[in-house]
């Protein structure tokens, strides 16, 4: 397969739609091609054999879930679980599809189980008991990773607020063994969201591309290359752009000058990856050009893992924000009914991943300066400039609400950190004319902004953590649309008064701040910049595959 399938396309309104013990490469063919036949052979072992085997210390390469396995067998008086060939075959054949989920077949005893299952009729009672236990351990690991994800996101992110419904996997296994629907029940554990299903298609596409991709020489990092400048790397850059089909093959450069045709190609490339579109060839752009199909394949695996962390039910009516794509979509009954560009947090002040429910809208909001901005921005600036607070229409109060005269504040005292700083409503207020609140521990919300020009940028990691929304008044009108007293016209009238008002939202709407850097748009796979540089750690913990 040629590289013509690996084509970067424009960013669209996309949202419509524990660590492995083995750090080596998974060399097994785990894409559903090495299934086994149902032998119909029933294993002959007893509860006594199970008890004895559980006491041994060398079952396979060791159990991943020893305590859970022991509890599972205790709950069934140590009766064997996998005597029936149909259940064994059904589970193993489902396990061979682990690669299609971006997981590794070998992480679930896959390479150990195959010979044991193929020769099940030659096993003695002790060996049959060990196979029984190994299958249970493999099931509990694979079921866990399909439902919860292989990695615990709380180990990676200090700010994580996505609730996940618990699942009793031991009970599920018991039920599946009784009803014989092991493969179906496993399939029901994985995400059903369209983004996840499409990412599986992308994974299959890039598995084929990476297996046939010709090697290329990496472009060296170095000084910035600006339009009109000469650089020895230009021929290599042009060659890579042609491989990615973003530079016309019929128009090769005459020398090593960064010309207008190249600049246009670089701008398209930057735009499609969510980079700052400046036409300048810097090291961030060079790094993206150097990414291979194998790296993109791993990037897709990282995003499949993310979706396993997220709730299976996002709600019939919800707002979905993809942080690195700077996009917000409102989804109702499965359809995207509106979308907005957004501005997210900088790398130093990241927008957290979490879910909550909308509660109210504030028209003409005051800005209660959050702790981080207070300590890092407002206090240092106010201490250096006596007119800073008045120029920014700010008041200072103590914990009892008493207004403090800024000229009486000892800015070198630690007491200043306990004061509350509030910027009154007005044209310079950073929250703009409206904010949409879903109270949360992160102090994050949606809001308007007076800095409308920032929405024209492609790379919009500019906020202190909250999400600034383009056309935020329109979004406020939408979330209040079920309330006759708050039409879009009424909201504009309220804004014109300059008075701060709080309006309760009557209709239930969930809001999800999620993070993913790859998805499908139509029949193409789209990648965006990993603005917080989170992909690599996920890929490392998932382990590499061939």
Image: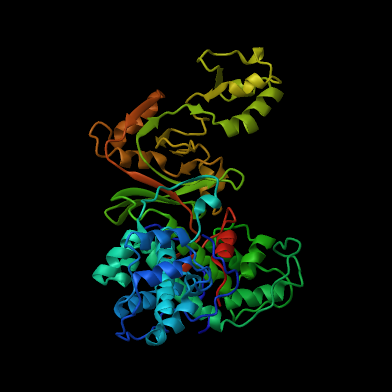
Give whichever of 431, 184 is nearer the camera. 184
For residue 280, say whether it is visible: no
State the residue at coordinates (69%, 62%).
283
Give whichever of 309, 281 is nearer the camera. 309
| Residue 19 placement (x, y as % from top left) | 54, 61
| Residue 319 placement (x, y as % from top left) | 37, 48
Q: Is residue 401 above or below residue 388?
A: above
The quarter holding residue 544 reads bottom right
For residue 419, say whether it is visible: yes
Give whichever of 442, 308 is nearer the camera. 308
Q: Is residue 213 left or right of residue 125?
A: right
Total numbered labels? 0
| Residue 403 placement (x, y as % from top left) | 54, 13
The quarter holding residue 420 reads top right
State the residue at coordinates (27%, 40%).
507
Tell me which colouring the rendered structure shows.
rainbow
Q: Is residue 98 above or below residue 282?
A: below
Quarter of the figure with the C terminus: bottom right
State the residue at coordinates (57%, 56%).
534
| Residue 123 placement (x, y as % from top left) | 41, 83
Q: Is residue 285 above or below residue 315?
A: below
């Amino acid at each position: 397969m040629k590289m013509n399938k690996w084509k970067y396309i424009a960013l669209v309104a996309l949202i419509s739609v524990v660590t492995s013990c083995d750090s080596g490469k998974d060399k097994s063919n785990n894409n559903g091609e090495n299934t086994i036949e149902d032998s119909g052979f029933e294993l002959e072992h007893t509860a006594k054999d199970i008890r004895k085997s559980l006491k041994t210390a060398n079952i396979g390469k060791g159990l991943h879930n020893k305590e859970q396995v022991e509890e599972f067998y205790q709950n069934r008086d140590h009766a064997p679980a996998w005597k029936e060939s149909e259940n064994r075959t059904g589970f193993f054949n489902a396990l061979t599809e682990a690669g299609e989920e971006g997981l590794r077949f070998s992480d679930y005893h896959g390479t150990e189980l195959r010979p044991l299952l193929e020769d099940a009729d030659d096993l003695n009672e002790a060996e049959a008991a060990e196979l029984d236990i190994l299958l249970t351990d493999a099931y509990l690991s694979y079921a866990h990773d399909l439902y919860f994800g292989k990695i615990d996101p709380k180990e990676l992110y200090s700010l994580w607020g996505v609730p996940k419904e618990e699942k009793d996997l031991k009970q599920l296994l018991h039920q599946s063994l009784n009803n014989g629907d092991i493969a179906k029940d496993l399939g029901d554990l994985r995400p059903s969201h369209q983004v996840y299903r499409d990412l599986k298609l992308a994974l299959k596409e890039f598995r084929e591309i990476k297996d046939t991709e010709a090697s290329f020489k990496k472009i060296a990092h170095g000084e910035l290359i600006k339009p009109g400048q000469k650089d020895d790397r230009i021929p290599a850059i042009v060659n890579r752009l042609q491989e990615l089909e973003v530079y016309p093959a019929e128009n090769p450069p005459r020398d090593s000058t960064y010309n207008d045709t190249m600049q246009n190609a670089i701008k398209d490339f930057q735009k499609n990856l969510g980079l700052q579109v400046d036409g300048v060839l810097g090291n961030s752009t060079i790094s993206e050009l150097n990414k291979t199909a194998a790296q993109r394949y791993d990037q897709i695996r990282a995003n499949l893992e993310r979706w396993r962390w997220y709730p299976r039910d996002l709600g019939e009516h919800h707002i979905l924000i993809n942080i690195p794509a700077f996009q917000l979509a409102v989804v109702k009954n499965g359809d995207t009914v509106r979308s907005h560009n957004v501005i997210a947090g900088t790398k130093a002040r990241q927008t957290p991943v979490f879910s909550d429910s909308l509660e109210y809208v504030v028209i003409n909001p005051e800005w209660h300066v959050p702790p981080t901005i207070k300590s890092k921005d407002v206090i240092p600036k106010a201490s250096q400039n006596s007119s800073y607070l008045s120029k920014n229409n700010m008041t200072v109060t103590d914990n009892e609400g008493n207004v403090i005269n800024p000229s009486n504040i000892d800015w070198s005292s630690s007491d200043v950190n306990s004061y509350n700083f509030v910027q009154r409503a007005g044209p310079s207020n950073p929250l703009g004319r409206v904010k949409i609140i879903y109270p949360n521990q992160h102090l994050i919300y949606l809001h308007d902004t007076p800095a409308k020009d920032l929405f024209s940028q492609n790379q919009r990691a500019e906020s202190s953590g909250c999400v600034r929304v383009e056309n935020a008044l329109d979004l406020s009108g939408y979330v209040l649309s079920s309330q006759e007293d708050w039409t879009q016209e009424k909201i504009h009238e309220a804004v014109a008064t300059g008075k701060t008002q709080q309006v309760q939202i009557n209709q239930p709407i969930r809001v999800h701040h999620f993070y993913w850097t790859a998805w499908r748009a139509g029949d193409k796979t789209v990648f965006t910049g990993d603005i917080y540089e989170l992909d690599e750690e996920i890929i490392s913990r998932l382990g590499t595959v061939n």
